[in-house]
Image (cartoon, grey):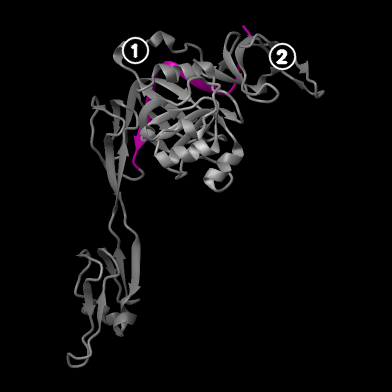
Amino acid sequence: MAHAYTPRLRVSRCVKHRTRRMLPISGEVVVSVGDRVSAQDVVARTFLPGPVIPFNLSNQLGVAATDVPRCMLKKQGDEISRAELIARSPGIFGMFQKEAFSPDNGTVETISQITGQVILRGAPEPIEVVAYLAGEVVEVIPEQGVDVEADVAMVQGILGIGGEAFGTIRLACQSPEITLTPDLIHQDMQGQIVIGGARMTGEAIKRAIEVGTAAVISGGMDDQDLKEILGEDLGVAITGSEKIGTSLVITEGFGDIAMAARTFELFKHFATREASVNGATQIRAGVLRPEILIPLNPEEVTPDEETSSEHGLLVPGARVRMIRDPYFGLLGKVDSLPHELTVLDSGSKARVLTVNLDDGRHLTVPRANVELIEE
């Protein structure tokens, strides 16, 4: 049977998903294999070293560098508070003494009799890693992190902005063709994952940020609206670190484009359910998709729905999305994959496939113009 490989986008009502949650440096894992965790449960924690705060005590006290250790009222390892007295010069016959006070909270790390400097280490910064996915801890990496696994409904988007977010799913649009406008964003959507339809307007995004929604998911957005929200052009490496207050995910692409009916129906089916969202996107080496994960109840798990085909395998009958003009965003099923090269309208030759679109049209397009939608 003819087949090929192509980039894939997953929209699935049931898939077993595993996520790895790691600390940036060694620390403490606070859960065990077999534990059940919710999305926002802490699974590991550590402390990042505080900032280094150097100051020249020799100059402040007016003494030689070699005399600095004798002037110290605190020793290495001592904790000190901001403005606390830490050193005093001997003065002359006990008079005309100079004093030095701590510039910040921290710990005395080094006292140098060569440079006359004292280095303070600021208070350590606590770092906690949450599970992100409500499920079962299936592996513990000692002092590093854990793997959490669960059966979920999953939607992968085209592009996301902002990091991880959590909340209940709330429909703002009643059909995938409706544009998400600010009047559809209500105050009671605070902390919720708002589902739009077609394009989310710039005004709707601003309203969502004002209300304090956890995330907004819709079919598309205008690139100029995105630039205005971010205050700059979007970078090409990786997204997810933007601090706009709300995570954004588009499922189809830029422009006034409706959310795929199957994707919208999945969100509609799971309305009011808890979900996790991650807007992080990487579109170059090591593709990373934004995602929405909805944990399933045991009675909702249907393993047979999970595709048995190899990931990325394009075969007749596979669901695909057009990713280039003039059919950008349209959905259909692969009809055939001819082996021979075909001359395109541009005069170049390429391998093509034939697609039966959902609207009834039959097209022949280059294989590079489609993206696989795994179900």
Residue 77: x and y in percent read: 22, 63
Q: Residue at x 38, y 11 (%)?
A: 303
Q: Which amino acid does the dot numbered 2 rest on?
A: Thr
**Would you say 199 lies left or right of 18 here?**
right
Crowdedness of circle 1 by 10 Å Cα count: few (<14), some, many (20+)?
few
Crowdedness of circle 2 by 10 Å Cα count: few (<14), some, many (20+)?
some
Q: Quadrant of the N terminus?
A: top right
Inter-mark Cα distance, 2 to 1: 38 Å
The residue that label 2 is drawn on is 364
Q: Residue at x 22, y 89 (%)?
A: 91
Q: What segment carries the magenta color?
A: 1-23
Magenta run includes residue 18 = yes
> In this orientation, does residue 149 appear?
yes
User: Looking at the picture, does residue 132 appear above or below residue 73?
Assistant: above
Q: Quadrant of residue 41?
A: top left
Magenta run includes residue 295 = no
Q: Quadrant of residue 21?
A: top left
